Amino acid sequence: MVLKILGYQSVQFVLSALIIMGAAVCIFTPNYFLFKLGASYAVHLMFGYLFIGMLFLILKQSNLMFTSFACCAGLCLFLKSSANQDLILPAKTNEESVKVAHFNISTFGNDYDEILNTILKTDADVVSIQELTPDWNEFIKNSLIAKQYPHDISLVRIDPFGLAVYSKYEFTTVDTFYYNNNPNFRSIPNLHCVINSPRENRKVNVISSRTYPPFNSSAYEHLRDHMVFIAKKISTITGPIITFGDYNAVPWSKEIKEFRDLAQLKDSRRSHTPSFKEGSFMLFHLPIDHIFFSEQLRCVEFNNLHTAGSNHIGIDGTYQFNSNISNVQATLQ
């Protein structure tokens, strides 16, 4: 019965059109909320096309099979273009490196010990904490800072926009810049800190930001404007830059791609596939937390971080100074 229905040219035409339309919406996303929301699941759609392509192969429906595989390949190339272009991460060298870890502590609920143990386990040089509330701030200051991170800057809030950056290295500069381009939204803080690496006395700019979650078209515009605001700030900064935070947009979204182009930053991720952890397939997890870096650095390691229960809680990355860029800049000077 299924084969007979699929044999009609009109049915094949409609199915092919729907398959192509799904891929086209992800690649050329219209500026409407539902289309943007659907395009966030481009990775899932890509795997879906691979699956139905195999199904059409078994059913000997060559036209539908080729259409599904072609759209799968198109989405694959599109998604790869938005990720780190390195086939493999650069090998670690003797160059000095900085390890950064980013966490959203709302994931932990009230499990204070788990967040402490997880952060200490990363042994990062710089730790970003977002959604920092007064209760969490008091706990962290009385434990984490005293043990391993002597330098910190915190913006404690009762809404989701509390930020903190903890560092093993001294801050040479600390700046807070606020975004508010819409009277319907609160002013959102962003942190800009400059750390001084001890080995070669090199300065690294780190920027922590969190955007407003896009629940509708207006919020998407707010998110885009906020990202452009951050990018313009970055364009005024000289030296190596690492930005991190929950940007509430997937790497292949128009908002993130525009931000990276304006700020001239690279993505730490080399793929966007859903996470596997301890046998748990995080099917609907979207990569909305990011670490971006400038050309003066190289990402030599990047990891998704999980709790013992396989919940995604953050990301970390290790960044070495790019000796090639440093040598060219020294020559120009």
Image (tube, rainbow, N blue to C red):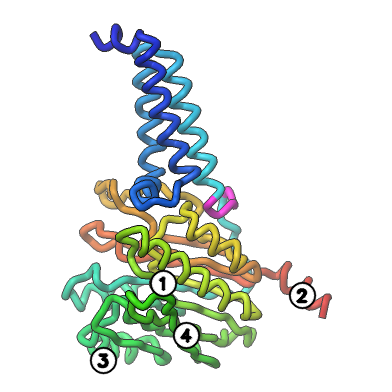
Q: Earlier in the sequence, mark 4 or mark 3?
A: 3
- Above or below, 51 against 325 in this view is above
Which of labels 3 and 2 is toward the front?
2
Q: Is residue 331 above or below residue 58?
A: below
Q: CA distance from mark 1 to mark 2?
A: 28 Å
Judged from the image, the secondary structure of the residue bearing numbered disc 4 is strand
- Judging from the image, what secondary structure is the residue with disc 2 in? helix
Look at label 4 and name its amino acid. Phe
Instruction: Kindly report the distance in space between the C-alpha atoms of the residues bearing marks 3 and 2.
Output: 43 Å
Q: Residue at x 55, y 69 (%)?
A: 319
Q: Is residue 175 above or below residue 248?
A: below
The reply to whether the C-beta atoms of the residues labelled 1 and 2 are less than 8 Å apart is no
Which residue is disc 2 drawn over?
Answer: 329
- Asked if the residue under mark 2 is in contact with the one under mark 3, i.e. CB atoms within 8 Å, the reply is no
User: Residue 207, how many percent across, how many down?
Assistant: 49, 78
**Mark pair 4, 2: CA separation:** 29 Å
Q: Earlier in the sequence, mark 3 or mark 2?
A: 3
Label 2 is placed on what type of residue? Gln
Which numbered disc covers residue 177?
4
User: Against 57, is 269 above or below?
Assistant: below
Please tell me which residue lies in front, 115 or 38. 38
Residue that lies at the very extreme toward the front in this rendered image? 183
Does the segment drawn in magenta span residue 22?
no
- Is residue 260 shown left or right of residue 109? right
Q: x, y (%) of residue 152?
A: 40, 89
The span picked out in magenta is: 82-87
* Circles 3, 1 touching at the beta carbon (< 8 Å): no
